[in-house]
Image: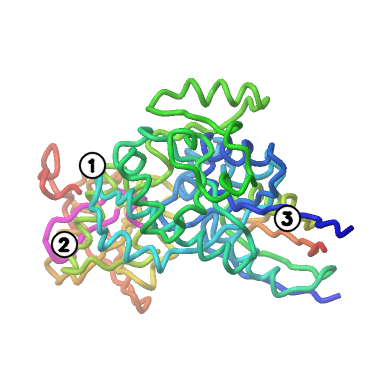
Amino acid sequence: MNREILNARRLLCPLPVIRTQDKVKQLQPGDQLEVICTDPGVMQDIPAWCRINGHKVLESSSGGHEYIIVLEVGR
Amino acid sequence: MIRVVEEQKKAIALISGGLDSMLAAKTVMEQGIHVEGINFFTGFCVEGHTHAIRERDKAKPKRNNSLWVAEQLGIKLHIVDVIEEYKNVLINPKHGYGANMNPCLDCKIFMVGKARQWIAENGFDFIITGEVIGQRPMSQRKATMPIVAKESGADDLLLRPLCAKNLPPTLPEREGWVDREKLHDITGRSRKPQMAMAKDFGIADYAQPAGGCCFLTDKNYSAKLVDLWQARDSKDYELDDVMLLKVGRHIRPRPHFKLIVAREEGEGRFMQGYKRDFISMICTSHTGPFVLLDGEPSAEDLYLAASITARYGQGRNAEQVDMAITQKDGSERTIQVKPLAGEKLPEEWVI
């Protein structure tokens, strides 16, 4: 299992979703991706994108002005 | 006996997040076609951005409508970044602009063309859009339907399920992949047929964007874009320009520079991210907005900008305020200025 970090700070939705989508294409099923964002919209959009594309959100958190989502790539 | 098992046909639906594209996709899904969605991000579909930036919008429920529609339909959605390619559409629209800087017909041709490219690369069979004849004055007219099909290169691979019966049969219809009789014949600007269809499908919740989700249909936004191009003597732009045109008050007191004045804390925080790209200023003796200066202001211009900035702070009636000016390299100095007097700024300064 591989774990990678995607810096999507300062990007506004839907760009963090697009960057997540593009990064996930390079990963294998079971790999984990931690996406770090500053747009609070990602707390809705990335989980929605994961649900429709068969990926799993493992963790979502926020602190200060940052929002972090950890997802597991699906099959 | 040899039995031929027909493969399930696959279609890509352009999903804007509105009702029409949702109904178009649903109509074709009902016929057993495998449908996936595609959504193109031009940089101007920026409703979500203002939600993200402005404090007062943060309480509003925030969702990306195209993702939401895909989830309701139970289909995958591919969001494609076309920011760079879209520049040519906006800068040189073959069919011109609409009421503002909206190149709607060229935009539709571009997006269907991108979808045509996508289906070729991904082994899909045809394209679905939610277009309705007569729905929009520029891009959805009887005369423009064949133009979109032809100039996009999609030709008869482009199916418009909501108005298909008013158009010549497309390949998916002729080949029997979809039953033309189960498609629709909607025309005009009335939303009643779509609302009835939504009810039949059990769709109760859907977005109803006025004028679409594109900022280029907005008069004030278009004026700021035109001003930007005039000031730079070039019709080029970057994504950051597109973003900054949506935030703050834009004031151009001289042709070679303008102020972007944050209207509230959320905008100020967002604009602080551009401190390395622009000269910025903020009042230090009184509460006041964060301001970016776009252009090449002289020392005299900086004084004028500072006096304008002071008008928007708590020190607007003071004899003098302290204004901290930060250069792109981070060096900072403070000047004392008298807030610009007068009831209003000259109208021609306000973009």
Q: Which chain is disc 1 placed on? A: B
Q: CA distance from mark 3 to mark 1?
A: 38 Å
Which portion, as a residue range, is magenta? B243-260
User: 10 Å neighbourhood of mark 2: few (<14), some, or many (≥20)?
Assistant: few
Instruction: Name the residue carrying label 1.
Output: B99
Q: Is residue B149 magenta?
A: no
Task: Give percent across and percent down for residue B165.
Answer: 48, 33
Q: Tag 3, which secondary structure?
A: helix
Indicate which disc, 2 or 1, sits on the residue closer to the N terminus.
1
Depth-wise, is mark 2 or mark 1 nearer the camera?
Answer: 1
Is disc 3 surrounded by few (<14), some (14 to 19) or many (20+) residues within 10 Å?
many
Question: Are tags 3 and 1 found on a single chain?
Answer: no
Calculate the distance from the C-alpha at mark 3 to the C-alpha at mark 2. Answer: 43 Å
Residue placed under numbered mark 3 in the picture: A53
Residue on which disc 2 sits: B230
Can residue B329 be seen by looking at this rendering? Answer: yes
